[in-house]
C-alpha cells in the first residue's frame, strides 16, 4: 500500500472506515479530549491495519445535541467525528435505523414503523457521513462503509467521488424480498447500496435476498453474485464475520482468569451453570429462553439445587420503547421463575442488567457448562464463537438458534428453534446430560471451525475483494 500523505486531514493508499460508531470512546473520567479504544469486534478487526498502514475512521461521536468534536488522531488513526442533534438522534438513530430497519431486517419481530419524518433525517445524516468520507479519503484510499445505519453512504459518496473504491458490509440480516418490499424508500436504499463496488453480507442467503431485491426494484441486472448497475460491476457476496480467536483463547489460558472462573464456579455451590449473554434486544430470544428454563424446572428432573441460569443482559438502545418494554417483560419473568422455583437458599435465575469487563466475561465463559445463544434472528452472533474459543479443555455445550448466522458454521452445536419453548427446554436437558466424550467431540470440531477463520481473515478477505474489484 502507498504511504500516507503529508496532509493531516487526509489519508492516501490506506483504508477509511465509515461506521455509525467511532473506534474510541471517552475514558471513564469522561474528560474532554481523552479517548480510549472501544472494545467492539469491528475495532479489533480493523485497528491493526489502520494503525500500520494509516487510515481514517468517520463515526458518530456517541452524544446527541452536543458541540461537534473536531477531528483528532488516535494511535495513527485519523478520527473524523460526526455529530447528531437531539432531533437527529430521535429520528435517524432511534427512529429510522432502530424502529424501521432493525425490526424489519430481523424478520419483523416487532412491527416496523414507516415515517417520512424519519426517512429524511436518515437521508440527511447519511449525507453528512458521505461528506465527511469525501473529505477524509484520499484518491487511492479504499473506503469501507458499515451497516444498516449508513446504507445510503455508498451511493452518495459515489456521486462525490466517482473513482473511489467503495465497499459496504451489512452486519445484520438482509430480509427476504417480500419483507424488504414494504419499505416505501426501498428503491433509493438499494440504489445507494449499489454505489459500492463490493456489497458484503454475513450469509449467502442475505446476499441472495439483496441481489433479488436489487433486480426487482432497480435497474440492476446480473446474477446473485455479480450485478451490473449504472455502467459498473457490483460484487455481492457473503463474508461471515468472526472474532479475534487468539485473543479469546489466550485470555482463557490466563491463570488469573482461570482463578476467577474457579471462584465463580465455587460461588454457585456445585450447581451446573447455564450461561446467557445478550444485548437486551428483542431479537435475542431472551423471553422465550427464560420460559424454556421455567419449563425445564417444571418438568421436575432438575431443580434450582441442580442448576442455575445466569442471564447477563447488556443495556442497549434504552431510548427506544420496545427495549424498555422488553426489559420489563424479562424482569417480570425472572421474578416469576425465582418466586416459583427457588429451593432453600438457591435462586434459579441470576439476572445481571449490565455489561461485564471482558476478563470477567471470559471467566464466566470458562465456568459455564452450557452456553445458550437463541436469537430469533441474528446476522452472525459472536458470543457463540467467543464461548467456543474459551473452551480450552474442549468441553462445554453450545445450544444455538438455527436462525443465527453462526449456525451455518457451528453445526456441532445443539441447534434449536428459538420459538419452541419445549424444544429449547429439551435441548437444555440434553446439554446437561451430554457425556464428556460427546462434549469433547463436538467442541473440538467447533473450535477448529472458529479457529480456521478469525476476524482478521474476515477483514483481509473483504479488503482484497475490494482491491480486486
Ligand atoms: O449488529 C448491529 C450493531 O449496530 C452492532 O454493530 C453493535 O454492536 C450493536 O448493533 C449495538 O448497536 P448500537 O450502536 O445501536 O448501540
Image (tube, rainbow, N blue to C red):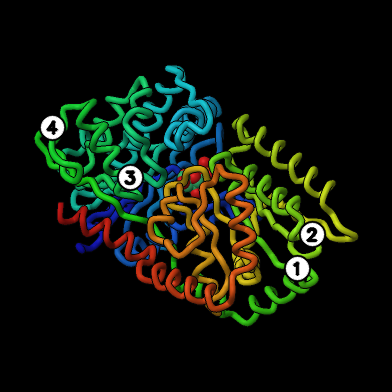
Q: Nearer the viewer, residue 355 or 423?
A: 423
Crowding at label 4, few (<14), some or many (≥20) Cα neighbours within 10 Å? few
**C-alpha distance separating marks 1 and 2:** 8 Å
Q: Are marks 1 and 2 in contact (CB under 8 Å)?
A: yes
**C-alpha distance separating marks 3 and 1:** 46 Å
Q: Nearer the viewer, mark 1 or mark 4?
A: 1
x and y percent of residue 330 in the render?
A: 70, 41
Q: Nearer the viewer, mark 2 or mark 3?
A: 2
Q: Earlier in the sequence, mark 2 or mark 3?
A: 3
> In this figure, which residue is indicated by the disc labeled 4?
230
- Which disc number belongs to residue 447? none
Q: Residue 123 occupies which quadrant of the picture?
A: top left
Q: Residue at x 51, y 56 (%)?
A: 400
Assign a secondary structure to mark 4.
Answer: loop
Q: Earlier in the sequence, mark 3 or mark 1?
A: 3
Assign a secondary structure to mark 2.
Answer: loop
> In this figure, which residue is indicated by the disc labeled 2?
304
Amino acid at each position: 500500500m502507498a504511504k500516507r500523505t503529508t496532509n493531516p486531514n487526509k489519508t492516501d493508499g490506506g483504508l477509511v472506515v465509515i461506521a455509525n460508531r467511532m473506534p474510541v470512546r471517552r475514558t471513564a473520567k469522561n474528560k474532554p479530549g481523552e479517548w480510549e479504544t472501544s472494545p467492539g469486534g469491528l475495532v479489533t478487526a480493523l485497528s491493526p491495519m489502520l494503525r500500520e498502514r494509516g487510515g481514517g475512521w468517520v463515526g458518530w461521536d456517541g452524544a446527541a445535541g452536543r458541540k461537534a468534536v473536531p477531528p483528532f488522531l488516535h494511535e495513527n488513526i485519523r478520527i473524523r467525528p460526526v455529530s447528531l442533534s437531539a432531533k437527529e438522534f430521535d429520528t435517524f438513530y432511534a427512529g429510522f435505523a432502530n424502529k424501521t430497519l432493525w425490526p424489519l431486517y430481523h424478520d419483523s419481530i416487532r412491527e416496523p414503523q414507516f415515517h417520512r419524518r424519519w426517512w429524511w433525517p436518515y437521508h440527511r445524516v447519511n449525507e453528512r457521513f458521505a461528506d465527511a468520507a469525501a473529505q477524509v479519503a484520499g484518491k487511492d484510499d479504499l473506503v469501507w462503509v458499515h451497516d444498516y445505519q449508513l446504507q445510503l453512504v455508498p451511493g452518495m459518496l459515489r456521486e462525490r467521488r466517482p473513482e473511489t473504491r467503495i465497499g459496504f458490509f451489512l452486519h445484520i440480516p438482509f430480509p427476504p424480498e417480500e419483507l424488504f418490499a414494504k419499505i416505501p424508500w426501498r428503491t433509493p436504499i438499494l440504489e445507494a447500496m449499489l454505489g459500492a463496488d463490493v456489497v458484503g453480507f454475513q450469509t449467502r442467503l442475505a446476499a441472495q435476498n439483496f441481489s433479488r431485491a436489487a433486480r426487482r426494484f432497480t435497474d440492476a441486472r446480473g446474477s446473485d453474485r455479480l450485478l451490473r448497475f449504472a455502467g459498473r460491476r457490483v460484487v455481492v457476496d457473503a463474508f461471515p464475520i468472526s472474532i479475534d480467536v487468539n485473543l479469546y483463547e489466550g485470555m482463557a489460558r490466563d491463570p488469573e482468569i482461570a482463578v476467577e472462573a474457579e471462584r465463580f464456579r465455587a460461588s454457585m455451590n456445585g450447581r451446573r451453570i447455564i450461561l446467557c449473554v445478550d444485548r437486551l434486544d428483542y431479537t435475542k430470544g431472551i423471553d422465550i429462553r427464560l420460559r424454556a428454563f421455567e419449563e425445564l424446572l417444571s418438568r421436575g428432573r432438575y431443580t434450582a439445587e441442580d442448576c442455575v441460569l445466569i442471564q447477563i443482559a447488556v443495556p442497549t438502545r434504552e431510548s427506544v420503547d420496545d427495549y424498555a418494554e422488553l426489559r420489563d417483560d424479562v424482569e417480570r419473568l425472572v421474578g416469576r421463575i425465582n418466586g416459583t422455583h427457588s429451593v432453600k437458599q438457591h435462586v434459579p435465575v441470576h439476572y445481571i442488567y449490565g455489561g461485564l469487563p471482558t476478563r470477567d466475561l471470559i471467566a464466566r465463559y470458562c465456568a459455564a457448562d452450557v452456553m445458550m445463544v437463541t436469537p430469533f434472528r441474528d446476522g452472525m452472533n459472536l458470543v457463540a464463537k467467543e464461548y467456543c474459543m474459551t473452551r480450552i479443555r474442549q468441553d462445554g455445550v453450545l445450544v444455538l438458534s438455527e436462525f443465527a448466522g453462526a449456525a451455518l458454521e457451528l453445526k456441532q452445536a445443539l441447534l434449536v428453534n428459538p420459538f419452541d419453548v419445549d424444544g429449547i427446554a429439551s435441548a437444555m436437558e440434553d446439554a446437561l446430560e451430554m457425556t464428556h466424550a460427546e462434549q469433547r467431540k463436538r467442541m473440538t470440531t467447533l473450535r477448529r471451525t472458529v479457529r480456521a477463520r478469525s476476524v482478521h481473515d474476515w477483514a483481509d478477505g473483504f479488503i482484497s475483494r475490494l482491491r480486486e474489484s
